[in-house]
Image (tube, rainbow, N blue to C red):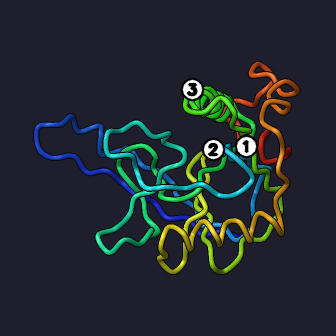
Amino acid sequence: MFVTRLLSFRPRRGYPRNLKRNIASISILTRVPATIYRLQQGPRSNLLAPHPEGEGIPIDEVQLDRDGLVKTGLSLKEPLFNGAIFMPNTHLMQELTRDAFDAYFEQDESCKPVLVRLAKGTMVPESLQLLQQDSQFALQPIPPRRLAELNECLDEFYSAYATIIDAGDWYQKNAFADATPDEEPHIWTEL
């Protein structure tokens, strides 16, 4: 079902020795292990290159390589993954998506934010890779693609396997206090 790779951070001299013990587990999955959600401005994928002045919304941004392609990869800064970020209904998901929801309306009051819902057990197509670290998931391209091609690939996947939900309605029905703690995957993988 998945492959796990361990990444370790080895600090330079002068940093405390206990930093060597920070290990993050990254899983590559073939199926979605829990119901996960992604907030975006509309039903079509809207990933874009980072805004030069940092005014963009981070959950919508992907890094482009020098050749203009979106490549599968990890970053040492946020966002960790380079792709469409998904999360189960956890406290972190509620916090990040509610902030982005507000930011969408600050940019454009007429926008209609939606949540893209992928049900537990959904198979990931060979054209995409699903990575997981803790309660964060990302759909990344395989092989590397131009940004427009990645958005098109995600649109095809969403139209076949995802449910599009009005974000405002979903937030009214799913209070922050009712979300699952991120550090309890035994709960959010059962939802």
Q: Element under label 2?
A: loop
Q: Amino acid at mark 1?
A: Pro
Q: Amino acid at mark 3?
A: Glu
Is 80 placed left or right of 9 in the picture? right
The residue that label 1 is drawn on is 88
Residue type, numbered disc 2:
Ser
Q: Which residue is mark 2?
A: 135
Whichever of labels 3 and 1 marks the residue nearer the N terminus, that label is: 1
Q: Is residue 108 above or below residue 87?
A: above
Query: In front of the other: label 2 or label 3?
Result: 3
Q: Position of residue 77 (x, y in %)?
A: 36, 45
Instruction: Give me the C-alpha separation between circle 3 and circle 1.
Output: 25 Å
> Closer to the camera, 163 or 102?
102
User: What numbered label is drawn on residue 106?
Assistant: 3
Query: Would residue 109 be visible to someone looking at this image?
Result: yes
Up/down of 30 relative to 93, above or below: below
Foreground mark, 3 or 1? 3
Where is the N terminus found, in terms of image quarters? bottom right
Q: CA distance from mark 2 to mark 1?
A: 7 Å
